[in-house]
Image (cartoon, grey):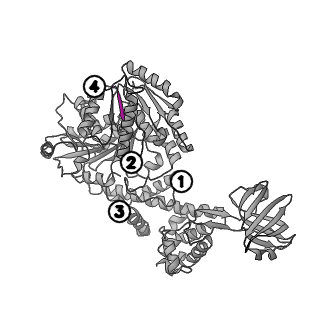
Amino acid sequence: MPVQYAKGVGPGRAELLARLGIHITRDLLYFFPRVYEDFSAPKSIDQLVEGEAASVVGEVEEIDLVNTGVGKSMLGVLIRQRSQYLRALWFNQPYLRGKFENGQRVVFSGQAKQNGLRWEMVHPKIDWLAPDQAEPRGQIVPVYPLTEGISQAIMRRITRMAIEHYAPLVDDVFPAVYLAEHQLLPICQAIGAIHYPENQAAITAAQRRFIYQELLVLQLALALRKAALLAGRQAPKLEATARIDARIKRLFPFELTADQLHAMAEIAADMNRDAPMNRLLQGDVGSGKTVVAIYAMLLAVAHGHQAVLMTPTEVLAQQHARTLNERLHESRVRIGLMTGSLPNKQRDILRAQIAAGEIDLVIGTQALLYGETQFARLGLVVIDEQHKFGVAQRAMLKQTSFDPHYLVMTATPIPRTVSMTLFGDLDISTLRDVPPGRQPVHTYFSTDAQRDKWWEFYRKRLLEGRQGYVVAPLVDESEELELASVQQLFESLSHGELADFRLDFLHGRMTSGEKDFVMQSFRSGRTQVLIATPVIEVGVDIANATLMTIEGGERFGLAQLHQLRGRVSRGTYPGYVCVFGNPTTEAAQQRLEAFTKTADGFELAELDFGLRGPGDLFGTRQHGLPPLRVANLQRDRELLEEARRDAQALIGPDPTLSQPAFARLRRMAVVRYGAALELSDVG
């Protein structure tokens, strides 16, 4: 029922509570405290910590009531605990003077702070003790998020009455047997304990119940979707026979890594089933994901099916097309490139060829999503840099054909807890090994005082025939400001440190033709230094470019810095990266230090996750998943692992979770995540 009808609320307070997202009485029950003040056990004065709540028992030593102005006063009460003292202060409450006497035993409860050598509490809660009374056990008091007009006292009174009247009416989503097996509190008990716990153990048990439930519901939703993908869905069986496997691998004139071979075997096994493959291929920069993707696409083509490789940018699409044409120039595989800059007439011709089955491999950007591209026999969809695409966009591509296999790729290594949530419905292949012959990248973090020394080194390498990048600082989301940033840096370097070299620049506001011309010039060596925005972070692969200067490094995320560094580790020459920055926060300093200490993308991903926290991992912009309310992926990794195992155990024998005992749990999963997860098969 509307919260205004709950005891102690009314229309006025209901309007205030609405600011906190509390609209119905159920919202009050699930409006959990953000922290607790623990007064359950009195502390000695030497145990006090500034800013922390505590209860202190002492004997009244001094009482001072001072007038501080017209109608204003300050009451100070000094209590002694053995040889230590604490002073309590109350402003404009002179009536309290008559309640204190020297020698009296009292308990003060509140937040302590140090004033010089003495501890103080302002407006503490007071308990008076009889001379022979034992030290009392106090309470653990909830502290709620508030809004103007609602105090802690009011919120505590409202929630206590709501729990008393409405918590017994809440149905538990878990059967009693499940609660016992998994050592979970029943819902009514958990609601009471999370708001008004008797002790720290009660807080832990209540929080565990709600965190586990939230993570299990998410894992069930992902498992339900994965089961639904397999139910009644038909994809072409594309077997990697020994002959086909050998023919494809002969196209790679280099030694494949153990990780690449393992990923190819996993993909081949998936594509040899009549259920659609849904696999995520994650790898560190330079680990050879594209080679694995080519293997999968050629496996589809070998069986007379078409394959699509979809990329987030035209620069990357053109590079993939160039790579495939080089690899397959002696084969009969027909390749088409569809991007937004393709003239309408050529696009129509290409669409007609795709629909007629005259194109085997299609590389494209989001232009593939529009204009109703029809495929003759689409067998495989590969999505590169999946995080660059929104859920709805991937869903649109899915609708272009009947049940193709799906392979999504990312060069941004994913922390394990994140992979179990955002990609919990995908099978995952991981590439950690770097192909043989790749040279190391030396990374430095420098201040302005060391600029001259770095640019001297940079020029020396350019004179030896190498090429380099200069990455403009990440200003903000404004293309206009990014353009100004690149142009300003171009002018400065053209007339300064790099005046004797051939420079060009690249940014997001250029037309596709302009970008292609700039990249061709850089690839051919005519341009020695490319000054660019982070548009180069993904996929640009020029072996001779081994130098990189990154300006404003504190403005980049750790994953993005690592992606940028990956541009200078593409060939047989060692790479060199120098990042300049002026970190003003400890987190920014830690990011830059971590960036220079390790080149392991998986290690950096975990470090970055530890520094940033989950953040907007569940934002609707990319994944469409509602945010977690009580769980924390960093803190609750063990519970996440447990919830994932339990979800799979429930769905394994019962793919639709149809048992009546779990009807409420299934409904919760569908209500919470149904709208988001029905959009796409691939996360």
Badge 4 marks a residue whose secondary structure is helix
Image mark for residue 675: 3
Which residue matches tag 2?
Answer: 477
Residue 482: quarter of image? top left
Q: CA distance from mark 3 to mark 4?
A: 49 Å
Measured as percent of width and height from the top left, residue 194 is found at 59, 66
Q: Type of residue at label 1? A: Asp
First-in-chain label (1 vs 4): 4
Q: CA distance from mark 3 to mark 2?
A: 29 Å
Is 86 included in the stretch rendered in magenta?
Answer: no
Which residue matches tag 1?
Answer: 636
Measured as percent of width and height from the top left, residue 561 is found at 44, 38
- The magenta stretch spans which residues? 523-532
Q: Which residue lies at the image location 15% right of the left edge and 47% below the top edge?
A: 376
Q: Nearer the viewer, mark 3 or mark 4?
A: 4
Q: Do we see residue 509 in this rendering?
A: yes
Q: Type of residue at label 2? A: Glu
Q: Which residue lies at the image location 35% right of the left edge and 62% below the top edge?
A: 675
Residue 81: quarter of image? bottom right
Q: Nearer the viewer, mark 3 or mark 2?
A: 2
Q: Nearer the viewer, mark 1 or mark 2?
A: 2
How packed is label 4: few (under 14 Cα within 10 Å), some, or many (20 or more)?
Answer: few
Q: Nearer the viewer, mark 3 or mark 1?
A: 3
Q: CA distance from mark 4 to mark 2?
A: 31 Å
Which residue matches tag 4?
Answer: 524
Q: Nearer the viewer, mark 1 or mark 4?
A: 4
